[in-house]
Amino acid sequence: MSIKNFESIHTYDQHGENDGNSRASRKFIARQIQVVLKVMPDLRAIDIKNDMLSNFGIKINYSWGKETAQQELFGDDDEAYDSLRWYESMVYATNPWSCVVIDADDGRFRRLFISYNACIEGFITGCMPLLFLDETFIKNRYRGILLSATGYDGNWGIFPLAYCVCDQENEVNWKWFLQGLWTLLYDRKNPYQPLRRLIMISDADKGIRATVKEFFPDAFHSRCVLHLVENFKKNMKNFGHKAYVTAMEYSPERWANKYFPGIRYCHVTSNITESFNS
């Protein structure tokens, strides 16, 4: 057999009907994205798309590359929700006296409350009586909100006490979360003396103020001063009067050291919750 003719220039279409589409497998693309997602979990899908094009010359679908990488890194969202009952039983088996509450409506997930017994006992016995309340967005397929109660340990380290997964931040969900929090600290049988002079620091209101007053009437509820200052600055352009009204609506005893009845332990912000959220 011998070569009779050799055409060094090919004129037929290289891609044909698949022109502009990726010929790389999902697994290959997911492996490339995983490295970045480990350190940058909030990376946008458009940034991933542009990086794959510039680094590999591959055009990918807008979102499926990131979704595939996230599933391999953190597991599938559907399977995670289906495994909640199994997870609940494993928490009680490995950390007795923990609190896991799954709120469902006809089998459909609504809310989740979790606090591990090690965190409960650790907070009561070894942490300052400070609790920081905040929310953050859950950035997965189903979205939702994560409510959290975070404290400081003896070394000024972040000490998470409890958190709640729900659909949105409102008074109903804050009430459900703080009711569970009250149960942990004041209505459970344990060998430790529960806190009686708790200090709670929160940011935006959205139902927190009324709920804290209902379930923790003896607690000192402080407001994040930075949040107050930002609202004050925003309303300064309205001749100062609206700024004054905004400040007074938060009640001076909640943000002014002169009027605050408790001890702030040198904390007037909720920065620790931002670290926990991250």
Image: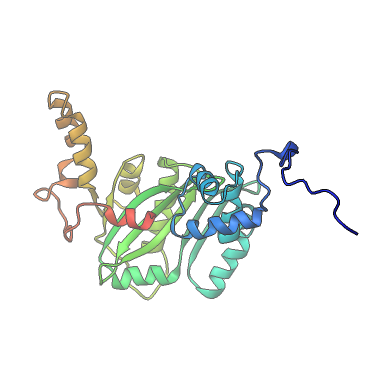
Q: Residue furthest top?
A: 239
**x, y percentage for residue 249?**
21, 35
Which residue is at 57% across, 47% downward? 57
Which residue is at 21% across, 41% downward? 228
Along the horizontal axis of the image, is 84 left or right of 119?
Answer: right
Along the horizontal axis of the image, is 240 left or right of 214?
Answer: left
Q: Residue furthest left?
A: 258
Along the horizontal axis of the image, is 17 left or right of 52?
Answer: right
Q: Number of marks in the image?
A: 0
Looking at the image, residue 7 lies above or below residue 161: above
**x, y percentage for residue 136?**
40, 48
For the residue pair 112 and 77, the one nearer the viewer reads as 77
For the residue pair 74 and 103, the one nearer the viewer reads as 74
**x, y percentage for residue 60?**
61, 44
Question: Which quadrant is home to the C terminus?
Answer: bottom left
Q: Is residue 197 visible?
A: yes
Looking at the image, residue 267 lies above or below residue 189: above
Q: Is residue 79 visible?
A: no
For the residue pair 110 and 157, the one nearer the viewer reads as 157
Q: Residue furthest right?
A: 1
Along the horizontal axis of the image, is 274 left or right of 234?
Answer: right
Looking at the image, residue 205 lies above or below residue 149: above
Which residue is at 71% across, 41% downward? 15
Question: Which quadrant is home to the N terminus?
Answer: bottom right
For the residue pair 29 and 216, the one nearer the viewer reads as 29
Displayed quadrant of residue 263: bottom left
What colour-coding does the image apply?
A: rainbow
**x, y percentage for residue 217?**
28, 51
Which residue is at 58% across, 41% downward? 62
Displayed quadrant of residue 75: bottom right
